[in-house]
Amino acid sequence: MKAGCKPAPQLYCPAPQPRQRRTFFFEPAVVNLNSSPIDKTHLKKPAHSLRPPPPWRGEIRSVLISRARLARRVHTLARQIEKDFAGRDLVIIALLNGTVMFLADLLRGVSLPLRLDFIGVSSYREGAGAGGLIFTKALRLGVRGRDVLLVDDILDTGRTLTRVLAKLRPLQPRRIKICVLLDKPARRVEKVAADYVGFTIPDEFVVGYGLDYGEKYRNLPFVGLLAPGIAQDVTP
Ligand code: IMP
Ligand code: MG
């Protein structure tokens, strides 16, 4: 440095901090839909934005999948189904009662001349625990030689869909594809996989958008987690 020159002022330079990890309320969902873009919007949602709307705050701990995310994803599923079944003789078979909301939204997005029928299945036990299955409504449409899209609310242990598939296969449809809003792979005991999955979720009991606990909460417009104390015998 030349004589008479002042040294450059020292700028305050804080030591580099380790990057903060953002915490999310639940594990990122992996969406398993062949060739469709993966919806990653939920990965940006911080935990505080997942509070349920006021009327549900006592019973619902948090929103797992918001109304907006459901709408976006169901729309994407519908477009994919429309593309995959174009020109086919399609019968959509939905399982009652959990598919009501999902099915209604899905069908609005599938502009194909399809047929629709329902199979009623119910667990012996009310609440959330596993029980035996009873069929409460039989299929009425013929499916022989037709393409079947079987729609259910959630694929959990896989027992329900395995039983339903065992009833459908002898009816000789051309092919059977499975579409579920939610997939909970952690609890699977049967070897069954869905071809169209809305969201893969962690091992939590969920309600809303058609899914119930003791026949309640089907009318929530979002998928949520029950508050502690509400669920008596929820498995897990
Ligand atoms: P799976 O036979 O164990 O695959 O379960 C399928 C059925 O169990 C679904 O159609 C639901 O009625 C019910 N179920 C499984 N997990 C949940 C949940 O987290 N919330 C509400 N219902 C569930
Ligand atoms: Mg159900």
Image: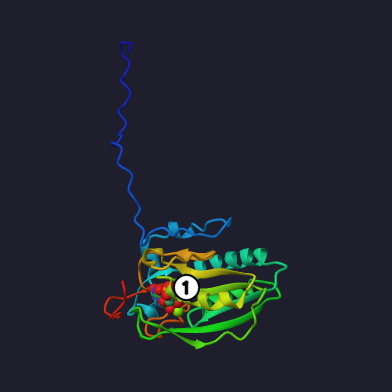
Q: Looking at the image, which residue sits at the far right?
A: 87
Above or below 6: residue 61: below
The residue positioned 31% from the left and 26% from the top of the image is 9
Name the amino acid, label 1.
Thr
Q: Give 67 or 132, whichever is nearer the viewer.
A: 132
- Secondary element type, mark 1: helix
User: From the image, which quarter does the N terminus lie in?
Assistant: top left
The residue positioned 38% from the left and 78% from the top of the image is 54
User: From the image, which quarter does the C terminus lie in?
Assistant: bottom left
Percent across and percent down for residue 201 are 41, 65
Q: Quadrant of residue 125?
A: bottom left
Q: Within 8 Å of ligand 1, the CB of disc 1? A: yes
> Does residue 150 appear in the picture of this structure?
yes
Q: Looking at the image, which residue sits at the far top?
A: 3
Q: Which residue is mark 1?
A: 162
Percent across and percent down for residue 121 are 47, 83
> Does residue 208 appear in the picture of this structure?
no
Question: Callout 1 environment at 10 Å: few (<14), some (14 to 19), or many (20+)?
Answer: some
Percent across and percent down for residue 210 are 47, 79
The residue positioned 54% from the left and 83% from the top of the image is 119
